[in-house]
Amino acid sequence: MNQTERWSAAQTQTLFDTPLLELLFTAQQVHREHFDPRQIQVSTLLSIKTGNCPEDCKYCPQSARYKTGLASEALMAVDQVLESARQAKAAGSGRFCMGAAWKNPHERDLPYLEQMIRGVKALGMESCMTLGSLTPSQAERLKHAGLDYYNHNLDTSPEYYDKIITTRSYQERLNTLDYVRQAGIKVCSGGILGLGESVTDRAGLLRQLANMPEPPESVPINMLVKVAGTPLDNLPDIDPFEFIRTIAIARIMMPRSYVRLSAGREQMNEQTQAMCFMAGANSIFYGCKLLTTPNPEQNSDLKLFNKLGLNPEKQQIQQTYSEQLVRIAKQLHEPDTEHYYNAAP
């Protein structure tokens, strides 16, 4: 489908009605047109401010409204965040994502967030943040600091949304994504499967994402991690084949986006993850924890990559203008080499 065309409800439903193996074949063809099928983008997610969130997202243990036993923590010190980023880079991550359990960041927090972004960029990593709703001016400040990606999930379809969240409207989420895009920050937005939604709701979520003026560059697809104390603790598990199907349809509908396996990988076996990669998933969160929920250990991911012949994608971090000036100034003071003649006076 042409990038400017919009997916209809009927077209999306047709994909959900397609036999799974045929769907996987189509998704793999689409994937190979736009990506190296053996490369997986690897990110690390750190909770920089945990718990006591005023929102009522029914899946989230960080909500102050639910008794989940989660201890609240204040905003981490910049040095602690950057040390975690160094460890993530050493473990093979190319992108460092920082998440804060806020409805929205306060102005007093922005200077610390800006320092974190600049520090992550100085390490040669891509930077990503998820901080709740943003104003246009806050998005501009984060962009000026060098932020590459902003994550703000839609979670589910517009029709099912108020069954999951009542403290923030769907339109508020769309507004934040618009502010992020207008500021020149890349968009990371996806949803959660297993919230009790229907297949029609899954189709509605993917259609909402794919029909944006520009689809998200990164689309995380989460499997609900049920946490005792949250209202969704007793829901039945989603069928793994239905999860794989949704991954394949996301790949077909958003062919140029990175489709990320996010929360819930801890409860997926190797075969399910392998089929998700075959369906077009080409990004994962790497490390032992996603915000407050478990994630497969790094060594188990590497073992799976080895079994499947996959490799972590090497990120090419574009230098800012000021970074290029520093590099040039350094070169001017370097001695001559076989390939470099210093002509500076």
Image (cartoon, rainbow, N blue to C red):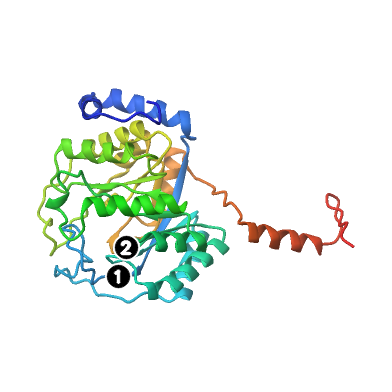
Circle 1 sits on which residue? 50
Q: Quadrant of residue 103?
A: bottom left
Image location (x, y in percent) of residue 96 = 45, 59
Kind of residue at disc 1: Thr
Image location (x, y in percent) of residue 149 = 43, 53
Residue 29 higher or lower than 78, as above or below: above
Kind of residue at disc 2: Leu
Q: Quadrant of residue 25?
A: top left
134 lies left or right of 309: left
Residue 44 higher or lower than 16, as above or below: below
What element does badge 2 sit on? loop
Q: Residues within 10 Å of mark 2 (few under 14, many from 20)?
A: many
Looking at the image, which is closer to me, 345 or 94? 345
Circle 2 sits on which residue? 291
Q: Quadrant of the N terminus?
A: top left
* Identity of the residue furthest to the front in this view: 137
Image location (x, y in percent) of residue 139 = 41, 59
Looking at the image, which is closer to me, 5 or 129? 5
Residue 13 higher or lower than 234, as above or below: above
111 lies left or right of 173: right
Q: Residue at x 41, y 40 (%)?
A: 257
